[in-house]
Every structure is written in structure tokens, then in C-alpha cells.
Image (cartoon, rainbow, N blue to C red):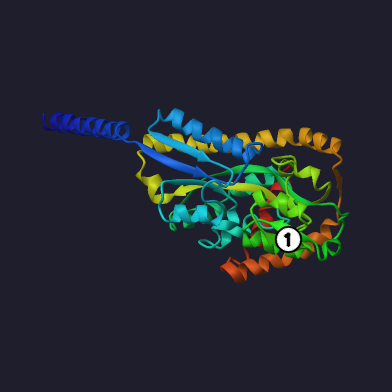
Amino acid sequence: MKKILALILVLSLTLSMGIAFADEADDYYLEIKFSNVFQPTEWNYKASQKLADMITERTEGHISVTYYGQNELDCYGDSVTQAANGSLWMGLEEPSLFADYVGDAAVLIGPMLYSSDEEYNYVMESDIVKDVIARLAEENIHILDTHYSFGFRSVVTNRDIYKPEDLDGVKLRATSSAMFSKTVECLGAIPTPMSFTECLSAISSGVVEGFEGSTSTLAGAGAPYELVKKVALTNHLIATRWLFMPEDLYQSIPEKWRNIIDECAVECGIWEQTMCAADEDTQKAMLAEQGVTWNEVDLDAFTAACAPVYDWMVEEYGADPELKDKLVKLVQDFRASK
């Protein structure tokens, strides 16, 4: 009899807890601002808007995400700071911007490391990256997904660029990431940090001669291809962003809605990466019709030129001096498995 009563008590408690959790989720509402710099023609913008709508719809409005693109709200490092400070915030930014909190984050997307989305995705699933993400959580930055990639970044100017020496004295727009600026410098150019919303006018006025960016950026908002027509295929950095929000905010959301956010984050990231890769040939065909040309470069020379970036990350951020070699080994293992 006592066993039966005990069982009934356990079942009653379990049921009551389930009802309590359900009530908690049903009574929970949250509004989040989601910000980045991208323009409506870019895949990061499309994926961001898709994500905001998807989370809002699938949580039945319990988690309402409003997307602000085009640098309307805080972007770049300021967006990361919003998360670290615990704002009602979601961002999509380049991983090296997390290096002020965890230095190894910059190394994960260092120059001349990957040659395909598949290699990048493989590394992102590794214990190395899981450890970096865990350490970012301790800094109140929760990484939701890493798939938001849109090709590879190359040098775009009106010059014929084949080796680092060809960039001597050339001013190129760089992002606000210190690691990106250092990479541009090691490529041989003079980095000039600015938002891409300022880049086209800077090219027109002669402040810079071009930028380093992806095919989708060249084909995107403001028609950059009307100003710069030559792409040197350095493919020096993967064009990727990490989706994030404050860790304490994430943990405060009932599990029912948190699981939906997780699912939507990954789904939209993979969607962007897949759609952008499928659109690459179409974009290149359009660019070719506009007079854009591409040329191969001395990749060995550019790879050697970018090696000091990794030493700089160790000095600047206290990054693991052995991390680059570990990542190279992972990429080599992946290539060998194919």
C-alpha cells in the first residue's frame, strides 16, 4: 500500500511539474531586437529576416524577434557588447569580433585556412570550437549557430593583382575587425576600416581603391561592380557570421521556446549557406556581363604573407599559439577522408 501511495505521489508531482512548466512557457513573452549591417540584396539580410519571422511564427509570438538591417542599430563590435551586457538582443557578426572575450575565436576563421564550406562546417563541429563556444558563454555570449556563410573573400579593385607586391600602397576598405585589417595589411595593402555602407562613396572619391569581399557583396546593394571590375581570387577568408544572443537571456527562456529558437537558428543558417552557394554561378554570370573579370593568384605567396596574422593573434588576444596547427590538421583530415 505504501509503495502504491508513493507511486501516486511521484506521478502527481511529475504531472504538477509538467503543468507548471507548461504554464511558465505559455505565460512567457519576450521581444528581441536583432541587428546587423547587411543590405536587402545580401544573403545575410535575407537569412536574418527569415529567422526573425520564423522564430516569431513558430513560438506563436511568445518570442517576438524584430530584425534591423543596414546598420540601423548597433553592429560589429557594438553588437557583441550588447550581448555581453545582457541586452534583449540578437546579432550576426564575424567571429573575430568575439576575440576581445575569447582570443581563440579569431583563429578559428584565420586567413588561408579553408577552401570550402564543407571544410569550415567540419571544423565548426569539432571539440575545439565547442570549447571556444563554452568559454564565450562564460562571457555571457551564447552562440546559436555558425552556418551563416556567403562564400569566400577576395581582393576587388581595378588593378591586376597576382602577388602581394601588387598591392603595395593600395588602400582597401576593411571591416572594423582588427583581424581583418591585419589580414589586409599582410596581403600587401593598406587597410582602411569603415562600414560597407560607406565603402562605395569612398571608392568614388578615391579614399580607397577597392575592398576585400565575396561575390555576393560585389553583386549586391549599390552595385559595387560598377566601380570595381577586377577580382583577384585570393579567397583569403571565409565570409561567415556567427549568430548570438546573451547567455543569461537564452537561459531565462523556457525550454519549449528555447528549443524552437535553436532549431530555427540552425535551419536558417544552413539555408543561407546552401542558397548562397547555389547562387554563386548566377551572380558570376551577371557580373561577367557587367565587365567583371577574375584572375588566379600566387596562393603560396599570399599564404606565406598571411602567416604573421596568426602570430599577431597570439600577441594581441592571447590566443593559443598551437591552435592554428590543430585547425590545419583538422582540415587536412577532412580532405583526406574525401
Q: Which secondary structure, mark 1?
A: helix
Q: Residue furthest bottom?
A: 315
In the picture provided, is 150 more to the left or to the right than 63?
right
Q: Residue furthest front?
A: 205
Q: Which residue is mark 1?
A: 184
In the picture provided, is 144 more to the left or to the right than 10?
right
Q: Quadrant of residue 285?
A: top right
Estimate the x, y position of residue 289 in percent, counting from the top left: 85, 35
Estimate the x, y position of residue 299 in percent, counting from the top left: 82, 56
Q: Is residue 309 above or below residue 45?
A: below
Mark 1 belongs to which amino acid? Val
Crowding near pointer 1: few (<14 within 10 Å), some, many (20+)? many
Taking the spot 82% from the left edge, 61% from the top edge, the residue there is 167
Estimate the x, y position of residue 298 in percent, counting from the top left: 86, 57
Estimate the x, y position of residue 46 in percent, counting from the top left: 60, 35
Q: Is residue 270 visible?
A: no
Q: Nearer the viewer, residue 96 or 263?
A: 96
Quarter of the N terminus within the rendering = top left
Q: Nearer the viewer, residue 143 or 187?
A: 187
Taking the spot 69% from the left edge, 47% from the top edge, the residue there is 334
Q: Nearer the viewer, residue 40 or 186?
A: 40
Quarter of the C terminus within the rendering = top right
Q: Is residue 232 visible?
A: yes
